[in-house]
């Protein structure tokens, strides 16, 4: 429960911890990057629903520095989410920190970092990529590669589920988004994009030393490599002129006003869609499999529904949203261990957040994770209880695993369909058993994922009580596993 705090003076600045000795604001930033979940939870507990990274102005933490220096401000809970997300002209998305190169400028000119009419136009051009017709095509790819993965697994085999699901999601993204089979160029492309994203949203950008062997130099080179690979794929697809993958849809896209994606826009949008198309879903699937293993009664109920409705077969596209137990499991997993921990904005004018004044140039972040674990919104918020969704109907500022407002994830329908299809297929065929004593820690880099997820594959014998095992690691501090 959030501690009651004295009402702040009108126009006062949000409270926050002091700079660390010697390290200053960078010390607090490093503490944040080391464990964002712990830092956010502690910040809210100590300072309330609006808090700052430190108690004074400092350079921006996530976004490219603006002419005005402010603070990094966190807004916690549904009311702060609403204030931030319903004022997109004030709290705008901005380009992240990165190398001062033309390559970075081009790759970051994508839908994630656009505002106003430009964002609306680009989103309209990308929407056909996620129509029902194309989702059905992607669904076939998902089933195909899921069956391939399950065909490789052997009864009694120990696997890292994180690695396996990442490979699966990468295969799906390669085929559905780029029309590529998951090998050769697609593997190089996906890994390069992964390296770029990891570095951009890490402390690497706080130490911009572009010297041989430094992480910053590797980031710059990886960005150049990613751009070159994407341009090659665009030309390959443009030359072929055929295909129903997302990249071909973007090449052909135009709206009623005659707008089309320019060559530079194609590169930047393909870059971000490839990442978003597999990273969020793979993390969400891994967390759901972990939670099902630790809650055998839920796994048994889900298996019963799936076998009764599907008879062992993968779900058709029409069936995936007609499985109520699966729907509740997915919703609850996205609430308890959703991949989206925080999303940044920048205040482009001096404004207020709650009772505090926010100066122009300040970064403002909202946190789906903190909201989803708010006891004022959810009863026993740290418990995995899919049955709660028979009774609750949270609004869009109380439940926002894919964000909310104009920048709600454009691929949410693709991610949700991918997650449900893979889970429905896998749970009927296999029972995944936790390795006793495994340490399940949390890595947050754009999305939250386990650092490793060691499990043993069992043929589906319905012995769900054997799947659960005592585990260690930080996950036990954010989920009540009983």
Image (cartoon, rainbow, N blue to C red):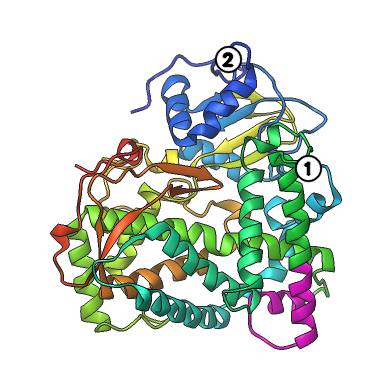
Q: Is any part of residue 353 visible from this angle?
A: no
The front one of 4 and 339 is 339
Task: Write down the residue under mark 2.
Answer: 20
Between discs 1 and 2, the one toward the N terminus: 2
Q: Quadrant of the C terminus?
A: top left
Magenta stretch bounds: 230-254
Residue linked to disc 1: 99
Tags 1 and 2 in contact by the CB under 8 Å rule? Answer: no
Q: Is residue 472 left or right of residue 193?
A: left
Q: Position of residue 6 (x, y in %)?
A: 45, 14
Within 10 Å of disc 2 (Cα), the crowding (few <14, some 14-19, many 20+) is few
Q: Which type of secondary structure does the marked residue at label 1 adopt? A: loop
In the picture, the quarter occupied by the N terminus is top left
Residue 247 in percent (x, y) is at 69, 75
- For residue 340, which numbered disc appears in the image? none
Residue drawn at x 53%, y 51% as measured from the top left: 403
> Residue 365, can we see it?
yes
Tell me how far mark 1 sits from mark 2, CA to CA: 27 Å
Number of marks: 2
Residue 192 versus residue 317: which sits nearer the camera? 192
Q: Outermost residue toward the front? A: 213
Q: Is residue 12 magenta?
A: no
Residue appearing at x 40%, y 82% in the figure:
318
415 is higher (above) or lower (below) than 308 = above
Residue at screen point 59% across, 21% down? 27
């Amino acid at each position: 429960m959030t501690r009651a705090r004295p009402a702040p003076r009108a126009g006062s600045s949000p409270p926050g911890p002091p700079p660390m000795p010697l390290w200053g604001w960078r010390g607090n930033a490093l503490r944040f990057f080391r464990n964002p979940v712990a830092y956010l939870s502690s910040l809210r507990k100590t300072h309330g629903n609006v808090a700052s990274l430190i108690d004074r102005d400092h350079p921006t933490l996530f976004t490219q520095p603006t002419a005005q220096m402010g603070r990094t401000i966190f807004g916690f809970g549904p009311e702060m989410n609403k204030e931030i997300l319903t004022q997109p002209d004030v709290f705008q998305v901005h380009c992240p920190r990165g190398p001062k190169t033309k390559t970075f400028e081009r790759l970051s000119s994508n839908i994630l970092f656009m505002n106003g009419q430009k964002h609306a136009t680009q989103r309209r051009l990308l929407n056909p990529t996620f129509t029902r017709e194309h989702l059905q095509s992607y669904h076939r790819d998902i089933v195909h590669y899921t069956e391939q993965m399950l065909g490789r697994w052997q009864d009694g085999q120990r696997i890292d589920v994180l690695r396996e699901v990442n490979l699966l999601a990468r295969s799906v993204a390669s085929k559905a988004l780029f029309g590529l089979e998951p090998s050769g160029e697609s593997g190089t492309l996906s890994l390069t994009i992964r390296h770029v994203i990891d570095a951009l949203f890490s402390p690497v950008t706080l130490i911009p030393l572009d010297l041989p062997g430094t992480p910053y130099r590797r980031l710059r080179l990886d960005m150049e490599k990613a751009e070159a690979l994407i341009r090659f794929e665009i030309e390959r697809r443009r030359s072929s002129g055929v295909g129903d993958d997302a990249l071909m849809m973007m090449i052909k896209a135009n709206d009623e006003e005659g707008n089309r994606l320019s060559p530079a826009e194609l590169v930047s949008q393909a870059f971000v869609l490839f990442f978003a198309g597999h990273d969020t879903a793979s993390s969400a699937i891994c967390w759901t499999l972990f939670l099902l293993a630790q809650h055998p009664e839920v796994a048994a109920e889900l298996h019963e529904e799936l076998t009764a409705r599907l008879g062992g077969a993968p779900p058709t596209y029409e069936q995936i949203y007609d499985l109520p137990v699966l729907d509740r499991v997915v919703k609850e997993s996205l609430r308890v261990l959703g991949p989206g921990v925080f999303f940044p904005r920048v205040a482009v004018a001096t404004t207020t957040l709650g009772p505090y004044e926010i100066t122009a140039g300040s970064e403002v972040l909202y946190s789906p994770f903190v909201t989803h674990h708010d006891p004022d919104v959810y009863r026993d918020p740290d418990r995995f209880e899919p049955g709660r969704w028979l009774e609750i109907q949270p609004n869009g500022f109380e439940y926002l695993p894919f964000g909310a407002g104009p920048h709600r994830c454009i691929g949410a329908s693709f991610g949700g369909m991918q997650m449900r299809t893979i889970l429905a297929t896998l749970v009927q065929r296999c029972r995944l058993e936790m390795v006793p004593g495994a340490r399940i820690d949390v890595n947050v880099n754009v999305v939250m994922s386990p650092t490793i997820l060691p499990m043993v594959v069992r043929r589906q014998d319905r012995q769900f009580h054997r799947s659960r095992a005592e585990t260690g690691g930080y996950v036990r501090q954010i989920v009540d596993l009983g």
